Amino acid sequence: MLVLAFGEARGGDVSSIVKEELDREFATLNKLDPSVYYLAYRIDETKSWTIGGAFGNLISSDKTDTRYLTTVLRVGDRQFDNTHVFKGDEAGMSFSATALPLANKADAIKQEIWLQTDRAYKQAKADYLAKKNQIKLDDTHGVADFSNEAPEQFLTPPLEVKFDEADFDKWQEISRRCSKLFLKDEGIKEGNFSFEYNVTRKIFISSEGTHVEQNSPYVRIMISGLIQSDEGNEMPLAKSFYAESPDKLPSTVELMKETSELVDKLIDLKEATLAEPYTGPAILSSEAAGVFFHEIFGHRVEGHRMKDENDGQTFKTRLGDKVLPKTLNVVFDPTQKYFHEQYLIGYYKFDDQGVAAQKVDVINKGVLKDFLYSRTPIEGTEHSNGHGRASVGSSAVSRQSNMFVSSNKPLTNEALRKMLIKECKKQKLAYGYFFKEVTGGFTTTGRYMPNAFNVFPTEVYRVYVDGREDELVRGVDLIGTPLSMFSNIKAAGDVQDVFTGFCGAESGWVPVTTVAPAIFVEKIETQRKAQLFSKGTILPAPTLNQK
């Protein structure tokens, strides 16, 4: 059995080494002109096991051990520094990362930190001087570039990772067995099962005196396939499972069952009706609603966007206004680790700027109460609420964490279905839509493109008013504009489910979770999905079991 306690297991204390070099660097850089008024180092130590299987065969199997340093350096002062964004400027993404030695050898680690910090200072100095040359009094509006926060000390003991060769072999075999089920139909072009166990030790040390060490583990199973219809249209389906550790994942029997059901859905999709563009009522399952709220609502309450004049700033002037139905509440809470015993990967104690995570009531009875803040102040607020997040090498901005959507007047799924059919009859439509599964989506928030969204459903059904069986359709994208969609939400369900994923934005990819109920929307719009066509194969698959 492998028991790894990260830094300590490698011989020594990496935090002490980093702190010594930070103190040495800051003592000098703080006296230069322009001076460094803030210096912080983020260290991400990761141990990971990844396994990939396709059509019953192992195609990848890897164990990796990495340690990365992200340097955060600010020149000038809190009011105006090298990160300042003028009105009309595009907020850029900052990358400053380097690999650190895995062994805790002080000289080797300090050498890499010294070189990286030197590069970071030279770039920050150039940026700062360039911005000072174009400063205008009307650009700052008195809003600082960096908030003043109290130093924090939080040291979680290193996580013991227990995952031995027998465990690795077990998941390799599960990968083979599950992926073999995709051989059922010759139209299936991709049939994959992937396993990823990732344990990260996150260390944050700053010149302000903050020192945070915490663990961020997750394990992910991804089952995915792609089938080709007779006319050449390619259609994907995927199913994922997340947990805190491998022993919390579904059993082998359950995973085989889930894979088999996904294969059957793929085969059904092959023969499903190609949907036409549609406008009318729909029900979004809790999973689909989770993606919807994350993409269409969540990104629009990330506070740094209120300072970016290029952003559409949908809600900038709407604090205190009703922006969602009065029955809905939205809370972001990164301090909540579980929901009904299900692990939430948007959980953390401190964000990537060393600020304590906080529960934020963003919507209460439909009224906008607050935004998510990093250490970038905006008009009306001076402090972070613990939502400054970033991946390795990126500068932290305000990002989502664990989002919880709830209703003050929840309805059963049966009641939502009755509302759907009633509204279809009112609009003289033969059917409405039920969006059951989605893979993700995207939204645009800038001013120079339409503020729109596109959610990618993979399992969609027509619900007929005449009582006939629901019909699976394919080729549907859910599209629209946010304010219009929000105004058409009429009811929400009484069962909340979890949607888990990784969100990509200005500061890289971060783990997020949305807990939401199903919702009934009076009017949605769909378009035909961009079709991926390819010519069919000349010969049948060699591994297909022919009868």
Image (tube, grey):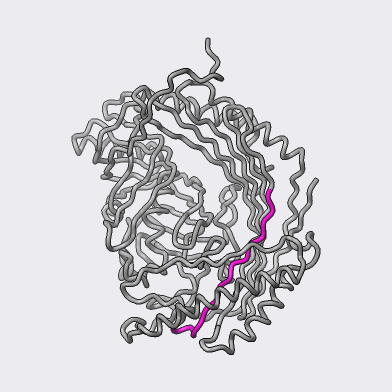
Identified at 65% across, 66% down, the residue is 203
Viewer-proximal residue, 246 or 195?
A: 195
Residue beneath the point at 56% across and 25% down:
181
**The image quarter in which residue 62 lies:** top right
Q: Residue at x 62, y 66 (%)?
A: 69
Residue 119 in magenta? no
Numbered-mark total: 0
Residue 230 location, x and y as percent? 36, 22
Report the residue at 59% width, 67% height from top. 70
Q: Position of residue 202 (x, y in %)?
A: 64, 63
Q: Is residue 103 left or right of residue 537?
A: right
In the image, taking residue 107 as reference, residue 408 lies left or right, namely left
Q: Give how far across and how far down residue 293 sits, in percent.
A: 40, 52
In the image, is residue 387 above or below residue 481?
below
- Is residue 513 or residue 106 the one in the foreground? 106
The magenta segment: 64-80
User: In the figure, 236 relative to 182: above or below?
Assistant: below
Would you identify the image quadrant in which residue 57 lies? top right
Give whichever of 351, 136 is nearer the camera.
136
Q: The N terminus lies in which quarter of the figure?
A: top right
Say if 487 sits above or below 466 in the image.
below
Taken as a whole, is the magenta stretch helix, strand or loop? strand
Q: Which of 422 and 337 is in front in this view?
A: 337
Q: How far from the left and from the top, in percent, is residue 487? A: 27, 54
